[in-house]
Amino acid sequence: MSTDTQRRTAFIGGLRDLAFFLEANPAVPVPTDSTIVTYYPEQGTDDDLCAEIDRIAALCGTSVDPRLLPLGLYTISRCFGPVHVEWTAILSIVKPPHES
């Protein structure tokens, strides 16, 4: 799980550095489409992975996207302007047998 304090601090710092850089350099282009940041939980059973996504969903005040379930993706998301953050568990029905 990526709630390690050092990892979080580095990630948040990197996002701030990017924002400050782009603000200070208006000639540098930014993506015209949404930018997607995706978190995948550590390996585990499907039940473990879904429980982790459900835990994050409760923290984010969102719910699982039912449209992606038939594809074996247990996903929640939040948008911050054009930045789209997803937390996704890839269920065993889409993994090759050697990864299950």
Image (cartoon, helix red, strand yellow):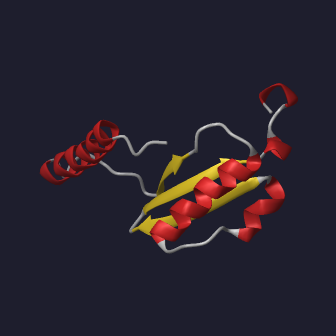
Check the image and name the residue furthest to the top.
98
Residue 43 shows in this picture: yes
In the rendered image, the residue lying farthest to the left is: 24
Q: Give the x, y percent position of residue 22.
A: 22, 49
Q: Residue at x 78, y 61 (%)?
A: 69
**Residue at point 44% right, 42% down?**
2
31 or 93, which is in the foreground? 93
Left or right of 2 on screen, residue 15: left
Task: Return the x and y of residue 83 as percentages of the image width and height.
Answer: 42, 60
Is residue 82 shown left or right of residue 54?
left
Q: Position of residue 52 (x, y in %)?
A: 59, 54
x then y, percent, for residue 24: 12, 50
Q: Indicate left or right for 30 with 91 as reference.
A: left
Q: Is residue 34 visible?
A: no
**Which quadrant is the C terminus positioned in?**
top right
**Left of 46 or right of it: where is 57?**
left
The image quadrant that residue 75 belongs to is bottom right
Residue drawn 23% across the image and 52% down it:
19
Vertical position of residue 73 compared to residue 77: above or below:
above
Residue found at x 27% / y 42%: 14
**How many labels were placed on the picture?**
0
